[in-house]
Amino acid sequence: MDGSRTVGTPPVLILLGPPGAGKGTQARMLEERFGLVQLSTGDLLRAAVASGSEAGKAAKSVMEAGGLVSDDIVLAILRDRLAEPDCAGGVILDGFPRTTAQAEALDQMLAETGQQIDAAILLEVDDVKMVVRIAGRFTCGACGEGYHDTFKKPKVPDTCDACGARQMTRRADDNAKTVMSRLDAYHEQTAPLIAYYADKAVLRRVDAMQDIAAVQDALAALTQRVMA
Ligand code: AMP
């Protein structure tokens, strides 16, 4: 990649990495700092499950087992979300694509609107430590801000620093057994995307074992370069 992007098209960034690497936390930072919209297929699927839609019913048990939801369901959800007006300023994809078929479908979707992927950023982590990271995390149910028992505690216990709500929630699939299955799914089905994006010369790597602020700085600098 020569560092330049097609002028006039909204930026498209992908965050790659295993569960627990910090994709959600970092995507939210990029959203605020660069005016991009975070598209998390995990969040979209959890919303579908909560709404009781047909897609949600089909996804629920797969998600609880730590497997991957079918490409058909995920692609339909993503396509609908991408078509919403707020995505016109650029997006950061968090947790998508997760299979080669999804990556190919994304290329096709973007080609239809003359867009392309500006960077696929791999958050590199040590897998063994991911189980601990995931087991300690929780989220504000009101605004979605992420926290961690060890690495990012709220200033006032059980109270969101960002919005003041007292509605902390923990994901049903953030338990050690499901995390192992999610890591297996990552290695078997998602890790091949590293080579896929390296071949397209859009792969970038960030050491995500550093603390959250250092990862944030590295990602912000990279995004700045990519969007220039
Ligand atoms: P996440 O919030 O990204 O950790 O995703 C939580 C769960 O949602 C995963 O373990 C999968 O079951 C499902 N999921 C999220 N994104 C995808 C995707 N792109 N393809 C298939 N399944 C997904």
Image (tube, rainbow, N blue to C red):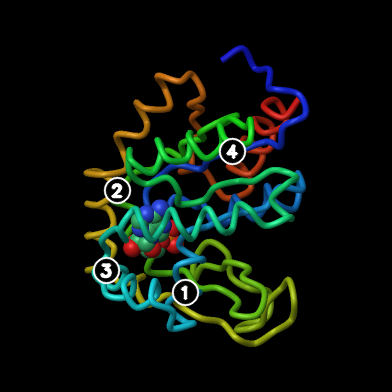
Mark 1 vs 3: CB contact within 8 A: no
Q: Is the CB of the residue bearing disc 4 within 8 angstroms of ligand 1?
A: no
Q: Does the residue labelled 2 lie within 8 Å of ligand 1?
A: no
> Crowding near pointer 1: few (<14 within 10 Å), some, many (20+)?
some
Element assignment for label 1: helix
Give the image quarter of residue 38: bottom right
Which part of the image, by quadrant, shows the C terminus?
Answer: top right
In the picture of the structure, the residue carrying the numbered disc 4 is 13
Cα separation between marks 3 and 2: 14 Å
Name the mark nearer the viewer: 4 or 2. Answer: 4
- Mark 1 and mark 2: span between their CA atoms? 22 Å
Dot 3 lies on which element? helix
Could you say which is closer to the camera, residue 151 or residue 227?
227
Q: Residue 62 carries which label?
A: 3
Marks 1 and 3, how far apart at CA? 13 Å
Residue drawn at the location 44% of the way across and 50% of the way down: 21
Local SS, label 2: helix
The residue at which mark 2 appears reads as 186
Task: Name the residue located 22 percent from the left edge and 68 percent from the top edge.
Answer: 177
